[in-house]
Amino acid sequence: MFGRPPARRSMLRCGKENARLLGNATLFGVVAQTLGVTVLAMPNPAVAQTERLGVPLIPIPLLGTSGVNQPGLSVTPTAEVAYDDNIFRTSDDRAAPVDDIIVTPALRASYQRQLGQNDLRVDGDLGYSFYTQNTDRSRVRADIRGSGTIRIAGICQIQPDLRLTRQQADYGDINGPIDNFQTFSTLAVKASCPRAVGFFPLAELSRRTTRNDTLFNFADQTLVSAAGGIGYARPSLGQAALFYRYSRADRPTIGVVNRIDEAGVTFNRAVVSRVEMSVDLHYLQASSKGANVRPYRGAGWDIDLVFRPIPRILFKGEAGRRIVNDSLVPAGFTVQTDYALSTEWRFAERTLLRGGAVLGRRQFRGDPLVIAAPFSSDRFSSLTLGLTRAMGERLNLTLDAQRTSRRTNTGLNNYDADRVAAGVSYRF
């Protein structure tokens, strides 16, 4: 998009409107205590949801290689039973972890069609998570997405992308039994005139929104991005582009505007049949208006490397640094750095073993005169192990285990959580 936040009021002057939006001070105090937040001067935290920037202007595969791979309608009902030993992601020092068994039936559907030279795709995912012990936490989730490719004169193409998601907020940054139902929307369009050899233009516009329950509407945002670049393709080299991306995020409840600028180069190539690589390196700058937030100026990157030593084994390494515009941790914006390694081993014709590890670090930059979080950075890690068994062409059985940990620089809101799950899916 153009480039995973407003008005124009000082955060110190939200006054009566914020008191009305957030409800009475007692209720807000419960939220603040759960989040581990110290609020100064007013009952209005400078908190927001999660929207990532830094997604490469040129996706992998590059613009121009999309198409319909399975035309028609595909419907896949699924069911999963999971045990989680810390559903609210609480610290042992603050409250005893609460465990639960969660049953999640879901239905996924995908429709693809070729319309002349153009492509159309619609994907939907509808599910409901039943908490067997903490039944008041049971919630529905819904995700629908429409995308396509409109080809013009066989030379250029336009790729619209629309998405709407409704879901329960993750408890990882709430760290307590408080619910927040979120709505995310995306409206984006990309344009390009790709060539097999030579230079070609790239452009993109997008608008993304985050909306929360009334108690958490301090995290609402509207993000508008625009990007442009010049790409170059050659079979012996691969595909590369120079690009610039401008993003502006409005967070009206707290009166803050974030601006993010990115300029750099993105490159991808299948070196040989066993190796694929994608590299996005850029200069990244983020600043805020309406609050005294320390800006970020430095490098940003997104690097993916896929290696297949033999056809049955795959290794994938990823690294990235990006600006996360908003999270439920009090911050004007967050500088996030991630490293991940995953592997797949098809050791039998119908059996796939999966494993992975993720390490991440976040630095939260906010205005201490308005709201002070009890920590300015955290580290998180995740280890996963999974097994998929195909019981024919349509029926799959899965087993998964995950260990998640978080550590903050002050030791507050640390947590560990273990989750195991068994699932089944059938594709019609």
Image (tube, rainbow, N blue to C red):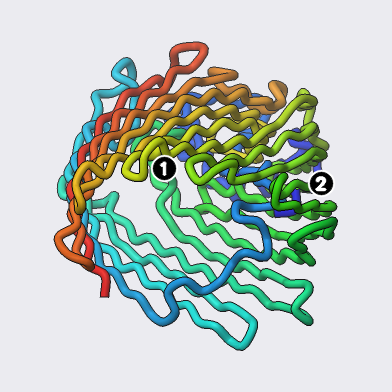
Mark positioned earlier in the residue sequence (1 or 2):
1
Report whether 111 appears left or right of 202.
left
Residue shown at 45%/24% (left/top)? Answer: 380
Residue 378 percent across, percent down from the top left: 51, 20
- Three-letter residue code for mark 2: Phe
Q: Which residue is mark 1?
A: 170
Q: Residue at x 81, y 43 (%)?
A: 9
- Residue 31 point in image, percent of width and height: 46, 35
Which sits in the foreground, 259 or 355?
355
Closer to the camera in the image, 351 or 399: 351
The circle drawn on residue 243 is 2
Q: What amino acid type should be assigned to the residue bearing mark 1? A: Asp
Q: Relative to residue 5, is residue 398 drawn left or right?
A: left
Horizontal relation, residue 417 to residue 7: left or right: left
Q: Residue at x 26, y 51 (%)?
A: 136
Q: Residue at (48%, 77%) from the top-left corner?
A: 112
| On screen, residue 384 above or below 105 | above
- Can you name the residue that lies furthest to the bottom here? 116
Q: Of helix, strand and loop, which one carries label 2?
A: strand
Asked if the residues shown at circle 1 and circle 2 are in contact, with their CB atoms under 8 angstroms apart, the answer is no
Name the side, left or right, on which 211 lies relative to 387.
right
Could you say which quadrant of the image residue 341 lies in? top left
